[in-house]
Amino acid sequence: MIITSELIKKNVVCPKCRQQTETGLLCSINTESEKDALKKVLDDEFFKWECDKCGFQTMLLHPLLYSDIKNKFMVYYIPNVERSRISDEKLEQEFKELSDIRKRLVPDINALKEKIMLFGKGFDDASVELAKLAVSEVVGKSTGQTVYEGYCTEIDKSSNVLSFQFFIGGKKRPYMQTTRFDVYKRSFDIVREYFPDLNEQGGFLNIDRSWAKEALRKYKDSE
């Protein structure tokens, strides 16, 4: 199965000099044909834009469908999307093989990079979200601060390490917290037992903190 990369043309007005420039935007990436896509996304290079007229640089965020068929996952990045699920009927009708592909929906760049990292290493993102929720509660109690979004930055079974970066307090300052890989394993057991059909649902799912809270509630109600 080959999902081709797609380039679209868009007129972009420079925020500094106000000149309009036609810019090519990759809105769909197939890692088999775009070999350097992974590095560009992880290094924050993919969305960088520079004005041809004055040299002004900024991040030009736009929807992106990231497909890694070799590792059986797709991530659909839509800036600031608030939906828990979105379907692409045209895509799923054209590619019936997508039934065994993990499909995710994310609202920001950090979440995009997190999903790519986790799936690329063979880990389950739903299990990481449950572990993240548990660790965020520990961080909240230990710091006395409100804990906002967080992202997994490292997961290593061999060294028994699971690392997160959270954003806490009114200024949302970065806060690093590590825990044992065993926390992931326990979360994985919960997902496997109580949510076995998670990846069989149609469409792109937003597996995030809200999902983890609801999943934890259902798990506790079943105990």
Image (cartoon, rainbow, N blue to C red):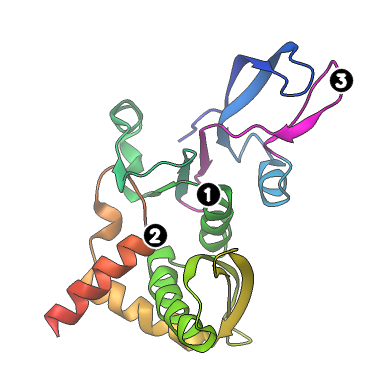
Q: State the quadrant of the C terminus.
A: bottom left
Q: State which tag comes first along the sequence, 3 or 1.
A: 3
Give the amino acid type for the residue marked by disc 3 in the picture: Cys
Q: State which tag comes first along the sequence, 2 or 3.
A: 3
Q: Nearer the viewer, residue 50 or 35?
A: 50
Provide the secondary structure element on which disc 3 rests: loop
Q: Residue furthest right?
A: 54
Residue stretch rendered in magenta on the structure? 46-72
Q: State the quadrant of the N terminus.
A: top left
The residue under label 2 is 208
The residue under label 3 is 54
Look at discs 2 and 3 and give the one toward the viewer. 3
Give the amino acid type for the residue marked by disc 1 in the picture: Lys
Q: Quadrant of residue 159?
A: bottom right
The residue under label 1 is 70
Q: Is residue 153 above or below residue 9?
A: below
Give the amino acid type for the residue marked by disc 2 in the picture: Asp
Q: State which tag comes first along the sequence, 1 or 2.
A: 1
Q: Nearer the viewer, residue 211 or 74?
A: 211
Q: Is residue 60 magenta?
A: yes
Provide the secondary structure element on which disc 2 rests: loop
Q: Nearer the viewer, residue 181 or 210?
A: 210
Query: What residue is shown at x 79% (from left), y 17% (from top)?
Result: 17
> How far is mark 1 from mark 2, CA to CA?
24 Å
